[in-house]
Amino acid sequence: MRTSIVRWTLFAVAAFAPAACMTEENGAPEELIVEMDHARFSPDVLDIRAGDTVVWENTDIEPHTVTSGVSSTSSNAGQLFDELLQPGESYQYTFSQSGEVPYFCRIHEAEGMRGRIVVGSSSPF
Ligand SMILES: [Cu+2]
């Protein structure tokens, strides 16, 4: 008797898990978090949809910047955002257009502290 209840529970979880994932993918705009720690962005590459908001959280013990562009020498450096975050601070930006947005930290640029937001279409169709 007990065994059959366990089996039924496992079946129910397996059956409903894919539906939950689909709802999340096609649903309302989301908020996604990128942590800044040990002079790196985590995750360094993040796939989102147009309309989603990315929140950078400095969980490190030193300041970092979140600066749009490939590097400080590129002509569009800081064009979308350029924020200095002290430890414990956060910054959020809503991406409205699809495309790829590279960004980096001005302080740790030489150490390769960079990331990329890949913005997909907001419509699944
Ligand atoms: Cu940094």
Image (spheres, rainbow, N blue to C red):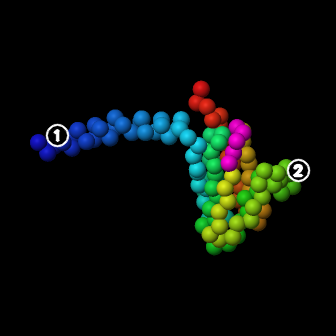
- Could you tell me residue 102's position as x and y percent? 74, 48
Quadrant hosting residue 17: top left
Q: Residues within 10 Å of mark 2 (few under 14, many from 20)?
A: few
Q: Secondary structure beneath disc 2?
A: loop
Give amino acid for label 2.
Ser
Q: CA distance from mark 1 to mark 2?
A: 65 Å
- Could you tell me residue 74's position as x and y percent? 86, 51
- Residues drawn in magenta: 94-98
Q: Can the viewer see residue 60 in this picture?
A: no
Q: Residue sitting at 67 percent across and 59 percent down?
A: 91
Q: Residue sitting at 53 percent across and 35 percent down?
A: 26
Q: Secondary structure beneath disc 1?
A: helix
Which residue extends farthest front? 28
Give amino acid for label 1.
Ser
33 up-or-down from 27: above or below: below
Q: Which residue is mark 2?
A: 75
Which residue extends farthest top? 125
What secondary structure is the stretch in magenta mostly built from?
loop
Quarter of the picture containing the N terminus is top left
- Could you tell me residue 22's position as x and y percent? 48, 35
Residue 4's disc is 1
- Could you tell me residue 29's position as x and y percent? 59, 43
| Membership of 43 in magenta stretch | no
The answer to whether residue 79 is left or right of residue 19 is right
Cβ at disc 1 under 8 Å from ligand 1? no
| Membership of 95 in magenta stretch | yes
Residue situated in front as seen by the camera: 111 or 82: 82
